Amino acid sequence: MSDAALDEGRMSQALAGRRILLTGHTGFKGGWLALWLRRLGADTTAVALPLGGGRPSLFDALDVASMVRHRVADIRSVEQFDAAVADLDADIVIHMAAQSLVRRSYADPIETFHTNVVGTAVVLDAARRMPSLRGVVVVTSDKCYSNREWPWGYREIDRLGGADPYSASKGCAELVVDAYRNSFFREPGGPIIASARAGNVFGGGDWSEDRLVPDVVRAVTAGQPISVRNPRSVRPWQHVLEPLAGYLMLAAGMMEGNRAIDSAWNFGPDSAGVVDVETLVSAFREAWKPRALEVQFDRSDTSRPEAGLLSLDSSKAKLGLGWHPRLTMEQAVTLTVDWYRAHLDHAEMRAFSERQIEQYVAATADPVATVTDFTREATKLCA
């Protein structure tokens, strides 16, 4: 593993000026990726559902609509999506739009399958008709695997599956990708298609419902206790910029014509990032000081079964792309808390977020040097 700074120059060389179609830019991960694509000089058209009301959003905090050609359409509708991209001949498509919440999938499984499975097919079908297309990155999830509660990480060759509607929908989305790969993307020199499977992400600007870190943030800012379910559940936690770097590496490799990218890829943390819910919440409680966070761990919530143990093996990405996690858990938590503190202090959040990308790019996975540096930079930007 190299500790050198991320080679962002190579990504910029490959993607600057390129026509990118991004779906899901009104979401948390999509908003960060739109900002990073702007930093790289890409010409981005972005399609997503409109934001729901009632809560803050990264989309609004960064004014993402001004960074991209912002278009509203439902990926579940062939007519809507085709109309939204009718004038676009993209070089790269990055498909991130999804129903991304496990517990919501129990409440509305049909919507989950319709969005994550049919929606993926709708996007791929539009993409395959674009004459200039060089590649497609489809973002799925680590939950696409048939989870056996193994103590080791799942590899890209392991069996797909899913015991809940969300996980099953992501396994199905992977099958859709493979079907399109074999049916429509096999011409010599034709477009490359890759799927990306990331672990549980967190970072500044996530206000999603029923998600751990946003729930912590809401509790801290409201001065209220938080009830945390399933504290012993183990997940591969990572900062949002970690997998986004992997997605951009895939896109850059597609522009370079690297056909070895034509497959599935895991982007997960190293073993230090595979911790239980209670450990992560405790790290956030420590980082928020002097603000108080009262936590009540609910070990009796069995209303909706969720996997107890899940981790990823990212050896393929490390060897094949040169990707690796750059942040320690402490650094990732520090970046996240600093972002929300800055937002509460009414900082200019686009500039602040761009600086966090710069900090990430320069990070060398040094557990000693960079946590203090991150906080120092955050203080300067909030001043």
Image (cartoon, rainbow, N blue to C red):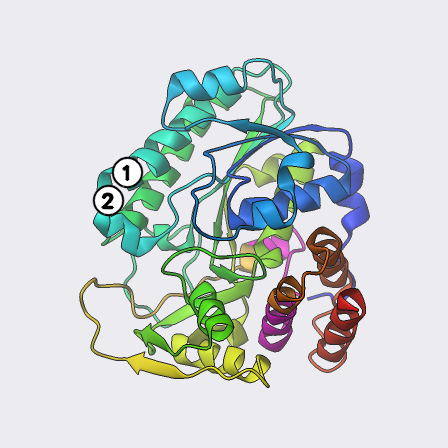
Residue 245 at least partly seen: yes
Residue denoted by label 1: 111
From this view, report whether residue 260 is shown above or below residue 361: above
> Is 232 left or right of 218, judged from the image as shown?
left
From this view, report whether residue 123 is shown above or below residue 267: above
Q: Is residue 97 magenta?
A: no
Q: Secondary structure at mark 1?
A: helix
Q: Secondary structure at mark 2?
A: loop
Residue 179 at least partly seen: no
Quadrant (top left, top right, bottom left, bottom right) of the N terminus: bottom right
Q: Nearer the viewer, residue 242 or 297?
A: 297
Q: Residue furthest left?
A: 303
Disc 2 crowd rating (10 Å Cα; few below 14, some 14-19, many 20+) is: few
Q: Is residue 327 magenta?
A: yes
Is label 2 in contact with label 1 (beta carbons under 8 Å)?
Answer: yes
Residue denoted by label 2: 108
Main secondary-structure element of the magenta-colored stretch = helix
From this view, report whether residue 220 is shown above or below residue 66: below
Q: Which residues are magenta?
A: 317-338
Query: What amino acid is labelled 2 in the image?
Result: Asp
Question: Which of the 4 image quarters holds residue 377?
Answer: bottom right
Q: Which residue shows up at 72% across the image and 28% down it?
A: 18
Query: What amino acid is labelled 1 in the image?
Result: Glu
Q: Which residue shows up at 39% across the image and 79% down it?
A: 225
Q: Position of residue 50 (x, y in %)?
A: 47, 35
Quadrant (top left, top right, bottom left, bottom right) of the C terminus: bottom right
> Is 353 left or right of 107, judged from the image as shown?
right
Instruction: Count numbered badges in the picture.
Output: 2
Q: Position of residue 376 (x, y in %)?
A: 78, 75
